[in-house]
Amino acid sequence: MATAPARLSLKARALKLLAQREHSRIELRRKLLPHAQAFCEARRQAHEQATDQQAPDDAQPAEPLETPNQCLDKLLDWLQAHRYLSEERFVESRVHARATRFGNTRIRLELAQHGLALDAEQAAQLRQSELERARTLWQRRFGSPATDPAGRAKQMRFLAGRGFSGETIRRVVQGADDEACG
């Protein structure tokens, strides 16, 4: 006789997601919202059944049930208070994962989608390393300077698509030409 799999609580789902990798508050909220809605709906139905079974003279004023958003906010606040959810760790892990493949602009935009930003120290470190990161990525992707303007444009578009600044792109592609001539 097969039993149905046990449904995870919201907290268990959140901890399972956070055990896999760091999440931002916005991202975790988005992933948990459908489950919070189902959880609150099940609670509402159970509450209705319980009140239907009570005798009319036993009726006590009903306490208001939490909305899915209230339930999620409470859980996310608890996760942050207990350091399971950390915006600092999320930013650090995202920068670490993206820095070798993307430029400062792309990293900043991705963090902004999560409602976060780099601190001054992280921004300075990324600025200082952007040229070297772009050169390494260019070398890995192309290996040699383009022989014609169309090839240079392709290389520049590639680096621009990865979020590197115009100045950095110019220096990488121009530097590649200097290396080929020298």
Image (cartoon, grey):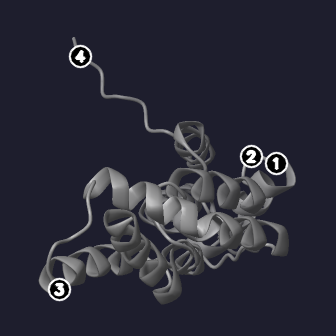
For marks 3 and 4, give the CA distance: 66 Å
Which residue is denoted by mark 3 in the rendering?
Answer: 149
Is 4 placed left or right of 149 in the picture?
right
Marks 3 and 2 close (CB-CB < 8 Å): no
Give yes or no for contact between labels 2 and 1 (Cβ–Cβ under 8 Å): yes
Closer to us: 110 or 180: 180
Image quarter where the C terminus lies is bottom left
Element on which disc 3 rests: helix
Please state if 182 lies on the left or on the right of 88 as rendered. Answer: left
Disc 3 marks which amino acid? Answer: Pro
Judge by depth and name the residue closer to the eye, 124 or 168: 168
Q: Is residue 41 visible?
A: no
The residue that mark 2 highlights is 84
Query: For the residue marked with disc 4, what is the amino acid?
Result: Ala
Question: Which mark is in front, 4 or 1?
Answer: 1
Question: Of the residues shown, which amino acid type is indicated by label 2?
Answer: Tyr
Mark nearest the camera among 3 and 4 is 3
What residue is at 34 percent from the left and 73 percent from the top?
Answer: 177
Mark-to-mark CA distance, 4 and 2:
34 Å
Query: Residue 119 at what x, y percent from top left?
Result: 80, 73
Of the residues under marks 1 and 3, which one precedes in the sequence? Answer: 1
Residue ID for mark 4 = 2
Q: Which residue is mark 1?
A: 83
